[in-house]
Structure formats: structure tokens, C-alpha cells
Image: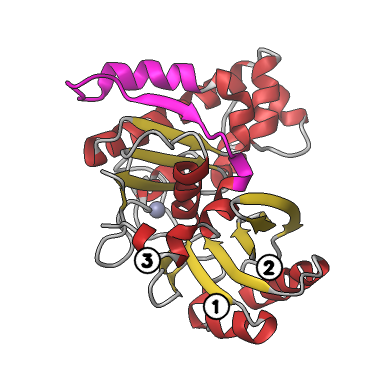
Amino acid sequence: MINIGVDIGGTRTKIGLVQDGILVQKVIIESSDHDNFQKNLENIDQTIRQFSIAEIGTVGFAFPGIVDMNSKKVLSTPQKYEDAVNIDLEAWTKERFKAKFVIDNDARAALIGEKFFGIAQSTDNFVIITLGTGLGTSVMINGKVLYGKHFQAGCLGGHMSVKYNGNPCKCGNIGCAESEASTLMLENYIKGNSSFQESKLSEVSVLDFYHLIQCVKEKDGLAQEILDHFIRVWSTLAINLIHAYDPDLIVFFGGIMKSHEFILPKMKEIIDQQAWTPWGKVKLAKSSLGDDAGMLGITSDFYTDKDKRLFL
Ligand SMILES: [Zn+2]
């Protein structure tokens, strides 16, 4: 049976055709209007139709927000696709494609992708961190995916405070990892620095992680200073997650992992020094599935086969 995995991001939505755990075809579309998820749904509909599949088994959504995977509803998504809370996505899928529907938080879907098909196949205790427009996390403990009573356990790591007097976050909290070090705040953070005008960063077209790393490679002082700050924030988040969830591996996602050699060794040094893990050292790795993890995870048996759906 052919399934469709839809990984909805802040800037890009990835739509994949998955057969027996293999991503056969993939299309990436721009995510439009953050105030209007209905509009994004129409774009998703059109893209799925372009695959020209006679019969779709399941359509799975990996969604950036708090999601109830049992009732298949989006519960909360501050300042992004807020109308999704009021849309009956299961009915939409049935009407448009006569297919089954599953939905989960996007980081959980990526975690399940890595566990079933990727770098985390040999461990039952790991955490993922996605570094992008926002910061996503999710957790597996003793082979079970962490959900909690209100479906928000483990997936709100990006909203753990790393600085009590830091930036206000769209979630309502202050000094979240996401409001201190994500693409969302990168541009303002760079432009707010007093040495911005003297930096190579003032010459780049888009202030994103890609250009930040390019400037680091060109030995730009401010770019290095900002990257160091971000690495400190991400390491603090990783240590919080280690202290909370006891993983033996942390898997990192995001376009910035193309330059993992500038990031992971420094994080490893900080984490090895500061995390309280008397049993040994936590391994750090970049995702082996990258952008495909969410699409593979959300179309996996975890969501359709109750025997494989182990969760806390
Ligand atoms: Zn927050």
C-alpha cells in the first residue's frame, strides 16, 4: 500500500510518497501564510494529486505543535497555523483521498523515523533535537515514545528555559531555547549586535544558519561569536534533556547539520564536562535520515499497528 507523509514546517512542507518504509518520491513546497492553515491544506491537496496514485492507504501529517494522536486533532500551535485547531483533518483526508489519517507532533514523527529506519535503531533511550525555524524535541525512554497525559511530554524541549531573564517567547514563557537560539530570532539577534556593520554578516542577503556558517568559515569574528552563543544555548538545552530523560544518544536535525563539524564537537565538549551522567557519556550524532525522517516516521507501522505503538 502507498502512503503519503506530509511534514509541515515553518518555511517548507515536505510531501513524500512512501511504500513499505521506502521514500519513493518527494516534493517540497513553500509553506504559505502562517495565519491560514486551510490555504496550506489546498497546496498539500494539489501536490498529493500530482503523484497520480490510484489508491492511498494512509495520509500522515507531521505537524509543528501539540497534537493528540488518538483523537487526531491539533491541540495548540501558538502564532502558527492556529486555525488548524478547528479543522477536522481526518474528515478532510477522507473526503479528498478516501484514505486513513494519522497525525502527530513533527519531532515525534522524526524520532520514530530514526528509531525504525535511521541511526537510532540500536537504542531504546534517545532524544532528538531539531534546529530550525523553531526548536523541536522528542523522547524515547526504554523503547516507548514519551507523550504524557496532555500529549506535551518531551516535545516541548524547545520551550525549556535556558535564561530566566531572556527573550519573551511566543509560547508565553521567557528565555526558551527557541527564543534564544533559533532561525526565528537569528536575524534580529545579529542586527542587534553593535559590531554588525563591520561584520561580513552585514553583506549577506539572508541572515540564516547557512550564511552564518559561511561567515564563520571566512573567519568573521561576529559570526563566530554568535555561533558560540548558539552552541552554548543548544548545549544547555541538551543537558536539560539529559537530566530530564536519561538518554544515551541525542540525534540532531536541521539544515545546519550539513556543517555539523562546526557544532557537534564543541557541544560534546560542553556536555561531557557539565552533564551529570555517572554511567558514562551521552553520544551525539547527526540524523541519518535528515529531512525524510518525519515523512518516514509518520507513515510507519507505529501509527497504524497498535502492537507497535509503545508509548508513555
Ligand atoms: Zn517558548
Q: CA distance from mark 1 to mark 2?
A: 11 Å
Q: What's under tag 2, amino acid-wise?
A: Asp
Say whether residue 170 is visible: yes
Is residue 268 within the magenta segment? yes
Badge 1, how many Cα within 10 Å: few under 14, some, many 20+?
Answer: some
Mark 3 touches mark 1? (CB < 8 Å): no
Name the residue tied to disc 3: 306
Question: Which of pointers 3 and 1 lies earlier in the amino acid sequence?
Answer: 1
User: Amino acid type of disc 3?
Assistant: Lys
Q: Is the residue marked 1 within 8 Å of ligand 1, measured from its CB?
A: no
- Please give the name of the residue rendered at 68% of the width and 16% of the height, measured from the top-left corner: 217
Residue at numbered disc 1: 83
Question: Is residue 199 among what the camera can see?
Answer: no
Residue at position x 62%, y 66% from top? 34
Q: Where does the magenta region start and end?
A: 264-292
Identify the residue at image location x=48%, y=77%: 85
Checking the image for residue 33, the label placed there is 2
Asked whether 215 or 151 is in front, the reply is 151
